[in-house]
C-alpha cells in the first residue's frame, strides 16, 4: 500500500497524504467515536477513548441501514451486469500520527509510515465505513442472504479499497476544524454540534477572534446547563440532541449578540483577545436574569421537559435576552453595574434579580397574550417574531413612565417612516421607528426600530435622513406599536 504526500508543512510534519486503503485494513484499524454532552456516557462498544474528546456526529442507525442496502444492491447489480458498482468515489478523511519524517511530493509505503498498532481516526466518512463493516459482518454470518449472494458480496468487500485522504499529525482541534468546514459546506449538520466544535478551545491567535466569540458563548451555555442554581439546569439540548427544551445553538446565538457587537452589553474587543476574558460577571447576569424570569412567570416555565409557553422556545428566549440587554443599557443604575463586575462567584445576585423583577411586573398583566402557546407570538416567524415580542415587552415597560413629545414622518427612499419620540420621568429620550433598517452592502445588523437618543432630537432626525443613500428600509416588517 502506497501513500503520496500531497501538501502540508514539512517543518511541523502536519501533512496531507493520499492513499487507497483496503477495507479489510480499515476494518481492523479504524476507530469510531462521537462527541457527547460531558454529563452523559460518551462512548459505547469498542470505543474506549477519553470523554468528550471527539467531534463526529453520533452514528445514525437508520442511515447505516440505508447505506448497507445501497452497497449490497450496487454489488449485486454489477454481478447481474445491470450497473458498475461505484460506491464511494469521494475521499474519506482519516487522521493518524507518525514519527517518520516525510517530504511533500514523495511516495511511501504505509507500513513504513505507521506503526503496526497505530489506529486511524475517522474525520469524515465514518457512516460509510461503519455501514460497510456492518454489512461485512452480516455476510460473514451467512444468515442474511442466499449463499451465492453472500459469496459475491464478501469477495467484493474483501477486495474493496477506500479512496482516503490522511491528515498526518493534525491535533484534535485541527481535525475538528476540518470536519466542521467539510460538513458545513457540503451537508447539513446540527448547528449546536458546530458550536461545540468551535467552542472547544480558546485561541491566542488574533485571527481566531470569531472562534473565540463562539468559545465564550459556548462556555456560558454549558454553565447554564450545569450550574445547580440555573433555571436551565439540564434543559439545554447540548449538541442539538437529547433531553432539553431549548437548543444550545439558539441560546448561543442570542448570547453572542452581546459579546461580538460593539453595542453588546458584554462586548469583547477582537484586538484584545490574547487571553480569555473574565466572563464570570456575564454568567452572574444571565443567571440572575433568568432566575427573575422564572420566578415571575413560573407557571409558564417548562415542567419535565415539556413546554407550557413560548418562554423557553427560540422566540421567547431570544426576545427575553434582548430585554435583558435593553435593561442593562438603559435602566440599570451604576451601583448595580459595579456589583456585577465585582461578583466573586457564579451565583444569583439578589439585588440584580430584584431590579429585573420590577420591570417584569410591568409585563405581567399581558403574560398570557405574550407567552401562551396559543398567543399571537407562538407561531414560527423567525427573528421577525422575536423582535416583535421584544418590542411589545419594551412598550409595556416604557408606557407607564413616558410621554409622547414628538411625532414625525421622514421620507427615506420613497418610504414614509414614522418616528415617535418619548420622554420619561427622568427626561431620558427614546424613539420608535415604524420600519427596521439594514445596510445590505456592509452586512450590518438590523438597526432596531427603537432605542435611546444619545444626542439631540434634531440630530436623530438628521441621522435618519442621512440614511437615504446608505440603507434600505425593510418594508416587510413594520413594528406593531400603534403606528
Image: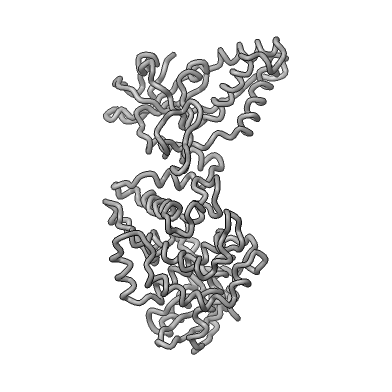
Residue shown at 51% from the left, 42% from the top = 185
| Residue 384 seen in render | no
Give the x, y percent position of residue 281.
34, 62
In the displayed structure, 216 sits above or below 189; it is below
Q: Nearer the viewer, residue 78 or 37?
A: 37
Quadrant placement of the N terminus: top left
Give the x, y percent position of residue 311.
56, 63
Residue shown at 51% from the left, 19% from the top = 27
Give the x, y percent position of residue 117.
38, 18
Give the x, y percent position of residue 151.
65, 10
In the displayed structure, 383 sits above or below 424; it is above
Q: Nearer the viewer, residue 172 or 160?
A: 172
Quadrant placement of the C terminus: bottom right
Residue shown at 63% from the left, 28% from the top = 67
| Residue 193 seen in render | yes
Counting the numbered discs, the total is 0
Q: Nearer the viewer, residue 9 or 390?
A: 390
Amino acid at each position: 500500500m502506497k501513500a503520496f504526500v500531497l501538501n502540508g508543512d514539512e517543518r511541523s510534519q502536519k501533512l496531507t497524504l493520499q492513499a487507497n486503503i483496503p477495507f479489510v485494513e480499515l476494518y481492523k484499524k479504524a476507530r469510531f467515536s462521537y462527541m457527547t454532552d460531558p454529563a452523559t456516557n460518551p462512548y459505547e462498544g469498542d470505543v474506549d477513548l477519553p470523554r468528550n474528546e471527539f467531534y463526529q456526529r453520533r452514528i445514525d442507525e437508520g442511515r447505516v441501514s440505508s447505506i448497507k442496502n445501497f452497497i449490497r444492491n450496487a454489488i449485486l447489480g454489477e454481478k447481474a451486469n445491470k450497473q458498475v458498482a461505484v460506491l464511494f468515489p469521494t475521499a474519506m478523511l482519516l487522521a493518524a500520527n507518525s514519527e517518520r519524517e516525510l517530504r511533500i511530493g514523495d511516495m511511501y509505503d504505509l507500513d513504513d509510515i505507521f506503526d503496526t498498532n497505530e489506529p486511524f481516526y475517522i474525520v469524515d466518512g465514518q457512516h460509510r465505513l461503519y455501514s460497510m463493516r456492518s454489512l461485512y459482518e452480516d455476510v460473514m454470518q451467512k444468515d442474511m442472504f442466499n449463499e451465492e449472494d453472500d459469496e459475491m458480496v464478501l469477495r467484493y468487500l474483501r477486495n474493496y479499497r477506500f479512496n482516503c485522504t490522511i491528515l498526518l499529525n493534525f491535533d484534535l482541534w485541527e481535525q475538528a476544524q476540518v470536519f466542521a468546514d467539510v460538513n458545513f459546506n457540503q451537508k447539513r449538520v446540527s448547528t449546536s454540534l458546530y458550536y461545540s466544535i468551535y467552542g472547544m478551545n480558546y485561541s491566542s491567535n488574533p485571527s481566531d477572534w470569531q472562534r473565540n466569540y463562539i468559545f465564550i458563548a459556548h462556555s456560558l451555555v454549558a454553565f447554564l446547563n450545569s450550574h445547580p442554581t440555573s433555571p436551565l439546569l439540564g434543559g439545554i439540548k447540548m449538541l442539538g440532541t437529547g433531553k432539553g427544551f431549548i437548543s444550545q445553538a439558539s441560546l448561543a446565538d442570542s448570547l453572542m449578540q452581546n459579546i461580538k457587537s460593539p453595542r453588546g452589553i458584554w462586548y469583547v474587543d477582537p484586538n484584545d483577545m490574547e487571553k480569555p476574558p473574565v466572563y464570570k460577571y456575564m454568567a452572574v447576569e444571565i443567571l440572575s436574569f433568568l432566575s427573575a424570569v422564572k420566578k415571575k412567570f413560573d407557571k409558564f416555565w417548562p415542567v419535565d421537559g415539556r413546554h407550557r409557553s413560548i418562554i423557553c422556545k427560540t422566540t421567547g428566549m431570544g426576545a427575553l435576552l434582548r430585554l435583558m440587554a435593553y435593561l442593562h443599557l438603559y435602566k440599570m443604575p451604576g451601583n448595580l453595574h459595579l456589583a456585577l463586575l465585582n461578583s466573586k462567584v457564579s451565583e444569583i445576585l439578589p439585588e440584580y434579580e430584584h431590579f429585573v423583577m420590577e420591570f417584569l411586573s410591568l409585563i405581567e398583566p399581558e403574560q398570557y397574550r405574550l407567552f401562551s402557546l396559543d398567543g399571537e407570538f407562538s407561531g414560527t416567524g423567525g427573528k421577525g417574531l422575536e423582535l416583535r415580542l421584544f418590542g411589545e415587552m419594551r412598550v409595556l415597560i416604557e408606557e407607564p413612565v413616558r410621554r409622547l413629545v414628538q411625532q414625525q414622518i421622514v421620507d427615506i427612499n420613497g418610504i414614509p417612516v414614522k418616528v415617535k419620540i418619548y420622554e420619561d420621568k427622568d427626561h431620558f429620550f427614546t424613539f420608535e421607528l415604524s420600519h427596521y433598517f439594514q445596510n445590505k452592502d456592509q452586512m450590518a445588523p438590523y438597526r432596531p426600530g427603537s432605542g435611546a437618543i444619545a444626542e439631540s432630537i434634531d440630530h436623530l432626525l438628521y441621522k435618519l435622513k442621512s440614511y437615504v443613500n446608505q440603507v434600505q428600509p425593510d418594508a416587510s416588517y413594520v413594528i406593531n406599536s400603534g403606528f
